[in-house]
Image (spheres, helix red, strand yellow):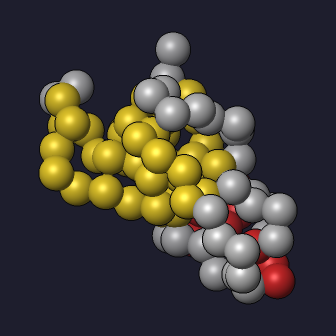
């Protein structure tokens, strides 16, 4: 699991049919509560907004988090840190 900060959205007019309806976010990794120069694109499953600190599941757990085990997803936002 990765802790990061949502810094932007990605808009895709064409995408794999299994990703239609998915919202993509740019997440900047955080280490020791400080942003580092590393980024990931993640599907948003919890309605996160820009500026929020989030938890990101990667790998097969990312597909399970959005109930689409056959979709081409490698990272999913699964929580918003309070």
Taking the spot 32% from the left edge, 46% from the top edge, the residue there is 28
Tell me the quarter of the picture where residue 11 sits. Answer: bottom right
Q: Is 35 left or right of 15, judged from the image as shown?
A: left
Tell me the quarter of the picture where residue 66 sits. Answer: bottom right
61, 12: nearer the viewer:
12
Tell me the quarter of the picture where residue 10 sits. Answer: bottom right
Q: Residue 18: image x %, image y %?
A: 80, 79
Q: Residue 20: image x %, image y %?
A: 82, 71
Q: Is 2 left or right of 76, judged from the image as shown?
A: left
Taking the spot 45% from the left edge, 39% from the top edge, the residue there is 6
Taking the spot 61% from the left edge, 43% from the top edge, the residue there is 78
| Residue 69 visible in image | no
Q: Is 73 left or right of 22, judged from the image as shown?
A: left
Taking the spot 65% from the left edge, 71% from the top edge, the residue there is 12
| Residue 62 visible in image | yes
Q: Is the residue 63 above or below the residue 26 in the image?
A: below
């Amino acid at each position: 699991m990765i802790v990061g900060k949502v810094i932007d959205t990605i808009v895709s007019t064409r995408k794999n049919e299994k990703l239609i309806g998915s919202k993509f976010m740019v997440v900047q990794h955080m280490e020791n509560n400080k942003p580092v120069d590393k980024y990931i694109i993640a599907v948003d499953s919890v309605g996160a907004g820009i500026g929020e600190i989030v938890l990101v599941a990667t790998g097969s757990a990312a597909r399970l988090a959005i109930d689409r085990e056959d979709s081409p997803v490698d990272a999913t936002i699964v929580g918003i840190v309070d």
